[in-house]
Amino acid sequence: MSKPLIKLENVSMVFEIHPMFGEKKKIKAVENVSLEIKENDILALVGESGCGKSTLGRIMLGLLKPTSGKVLYYINGKYKDIWSLSKKEYKVFRRNAQLIPQNPYTTINPMRNVISALIPPFLHYKIARNKEEAKKMVAEHLKMVGLAPPEDFFNRYSCRLSGGQLQRIAIARAISVKPKFIVADEAVSMLDASLRIEILDLLLRIREEYGLAVLFITHDLAIARYFARKNKIAIMYLGNIVEMGNTEDIIKNPLHPYTKALIMSVPIPDPDIARKRGLPKLRSLEVPSLVNPPSGCKFHTRCPLATEICQKQAPALRNINGRLVACHKIGDIDSK
Amino acid sequence: MPKWENLLFVSYILCSMRWIIRRLIIAIFTIYIVITITFFLIRLMPGNFIDMMVYYYMTTYGMSEIEARNTVYALYNVAPDEPIFLQYIKYLFGLINGNWGKSYISNKSVLEILLYGLPWTAFLLSVSLTISFVIGILLGIFMAYRRGTFLDSLLSTLSSISRATPNFILGLLLLYFLAIYYPIFPARDSYDITIEPGLSIQFISSVLYHSFLPMLAYILTSFGGWALAMRSSAIRVLGEDYVIAAEARGLKPGRIARTYVGRNAVLPLFTSFAISLGYMFGGSVFIETYFAYQGVGQIIGLAMSWRDYPLIQGGFLLITITVVLSNLLADMLYGLLDPRIKRGGTHGR
Amino acid sequence: MVGRLRTLEKILFEHIYIPLKILAKDKRALFGLFMLIAYILISLIGPMIIPLDLTPNLEERYLPPSWKHPLGTDFAGRDILAQLVHGGRDVLTAAFAAGIVTVGIGTVIGIIAGYMGGKIDTVITALIDIFLTIPGFPLLMVIAAWLLQSGIPINILTIAFVLSITSWAGLARAVRAQTLSIKNEEFIEVDKCLGLSKLYIIFYEILPNLMPYIAMNFMLSSVSAIYSYTGLMALGLIPLTPGNWGAMINMAQAYVGTITGAGATYILAPSFAIILLQISLVFLANGIDKIFNPRLREW
């Protein structure tokens, strides 16, 4: 088993906002999250909008500094917090952690053309010695992501390209510096459904070739399952991780009530099977606000299994049958 | 709504809106900075200026040097033997108490002179601004609805021309052609001096008659800016989903234009209202000078040519205070009109 | 050698031919551009063709337009056309100098405020608000009066600076807002991940997005500078330079009471020169948006 590349230890992120009226408010976007991603592994991070997964992604990339906790990166034989790396070490980390963002139309500056967006990383890290060489490398990468002939795309602006093409360019951009780790933040959410599988397959192929670790953030459980089917998945709710483990295990046999509800919410085309399955048994359909989260276990307001202890104490992640679950009500018994 | 409810509402907004307080602080600060600038400008002038004034007083009024010096110092609230800080405080107190110095040309209190001209300028500017604003926004909506047609193109060109023309040049041309060459309109003064000021019809009509050309100069050179701004704002609103939805619901086009498009498109224009007031005050120097219209602009113009520094200082200060106050008013009006601020929702200020 | 030629060709193509092609679709902007070029040419070459003779010739006062004096003569018998042609230089230089300084100051301050954020931003924003509120022209007058007294020479450079003091705030505010909104875009995040430096982000990502504002504001600042410059001259608040259009207006209005029909050209000529120049700049400013914003292009 390969060793972890990036580890998050007790990471919390609290945002302060200054609204028009009244005092400052605090939003606990991420609370006390610990997880790790191994080399060459995939972790799908699933949750509804606002649960903090994008924030977590950016913390992992060093774009946001967590209010508490450590972000550890394996470098020079040790795990070091990325916020206390030396300049040289930070450069190594920086090169190895890349982002594929959500909106294909803002992955490159709308005011600049494709080639001017793709060349600079090659020159910055001296992968190419001059502009000519960089151009050739850009052409290669474009071919790699399925945009051929590449010269056609050099001078185009993002307004003349389709979502699918732009997302391919985003992928090309991310892998241009040969990183070890990529965060794909809702990378296919803004694409037409027909394109999604193509882009996901492309991403999987490139991952194989480059040996990348991927944090795949999405709200769509079905896509997460497709992408990470041989790897791991983590479910997030209101800033906490509620279940984490092998994807197929969790999908076929979810333990946490929230995970069960999520799975039951995925639409099934066949009406008979859907009817048999029924709707998730939630006590309330309202998602609590992040400014005033519920006490104890944050899911207790909606959880069908909630009792007094769920209101008072937040459950820790416990290892049950080879996966991590944060729930008071799940013992070592499988409950369907 | 009964009046007291309105007042309560306003005070509620004032107390709980951070940004109104911020605007207030900035307003006070602006005035403070202007006061400080003018104070130090005087101090920083090379010594020979003060000496020039002393010489002037000595020769014109036959004073001895010491008397002349004291007079000059009193004029500017300058006391070179005292530390600057003390002078500054005294100056500030003087301002608050209404002692804005004395015009050295006419020896009258600066405040008195300015306050005489203020209502005239205020009258001229507010009427002109209102008329050009109204014409502008009506034209703007008209153009937006006929976007792309020949009429729109023509009106846009006219509006651009209006915006580009300097107001003083138009004023001069109007003066020349409509008051001197073909004397249709009077060429001087704010009213016929032979008529007693009062609420008589004669007086009022005389005032209107005399103010027609200056107002025309302002209006013709400002409606274009408003029209173009309103046009682009209205075009943006017309593309919004709620307008299309309103049309789909079958609301009458007139109603849509007034309540949906009109109101939403006008809102952003309020912020430029402030800047335009300042601009018009600037133009008033020319227009009032050319038309010999007794307003603050003409006073400052004369003061400039006579190098009457206390008057210049005072005039500048007065104009700034007026502009700052109207900005504040405009902001508060905007706050009342924009429901998003009323309810304290998300508003990216 | 061939490589160099090709790059020159490319630069010409990208920076001149394409913008022209885009502008050509907007007839008003095209008009503005041609007029502006005409003004520049006349101001540069005109003085060489038509000499300026400022000696008073009292017999030829207020002559109506004729072949010898196409625009007639002024109150001192001097040719108006010559004065007009010579005056252009002054006005255009002042306008563009002021435009450049204004745009420079406004952009730098705006970017600093937007990018740095925090306390610096709060201070700068307050400054911007203050300068936006202080009425520009009166401030200009006060500064001009002070300048006159202080003995600092009033040349084009000083005028440019003084004119910019009152107009930098508008652009600074727009630049700051744009910088703030771009700062959080996804492509900036990717840039940061890719390790590109802050300077790179400012110059290559933020600045191109600012170009529409900057270009437009340059034109509009020039318009405002022309207004203020000719205005100050027309009021006699700054020393008159010969042939300057504002100076001509100053002289014209001083004699307004005694002008007969023939002297009309004395008022009309500089007035129309100024108005036409302003109109050209405004038209050009409106059309310039399309060049810098690829999204607005139709092809």
Image: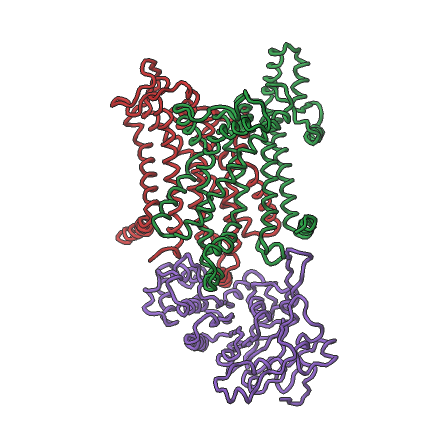
Q: Which color mode does the image show? A: by chain
Which image quarter holds the N terminus of chain A?
Answer: bottom right
Q: Is residue A4 above or below residue B335?
A: below
Residue B225 in view in this figure: yes
Q: Is residue B60 above or below residue A291?
A: above
Residue furthest front in the image: B201
Q: Would you say C233 lies left or right of A84 here?
A: left
In which quarter of the view is residue A26 placed?
bottom right
Q: Would you say B210 lies left or right of C266 here?
A: right
Specify the colour of chain B: green
Q: How many marks?
A: 0
Residue A20 pos. (x, y %): 64, 55
Q: Is residue B238 above or below residue C87?
A: below
Residue at position x 34%, y 13% from top?
Answer: C58
Viewer-proximal residue among B254 and B137: B254
Which image quarter holds the C terminus of chain A?
Answer: bottom right
Viewer-proximal residue among B181 and A94: B181
In which quarter of the view is residue B184 placed?
top left
Residue B74 pos. (x, y %): 68, 21
Residue C89 pos. (x, y %): 37, 31
Residue A76 in view in this figure: no
Instruction: Kindly indicate which chain is depicted in red in the rendered structure.
Output: C
Viewer-proximal residue among B303 and A333: B303
Residue at position x 36%, y 36% from top?
Answer: C276
Q: Is residue B205 above or below residue A268?
A: above
Specify the colour of chain A: purple
Residue furthest left in the image: C67
Residue A236 pos. (x, y %): 60, 75
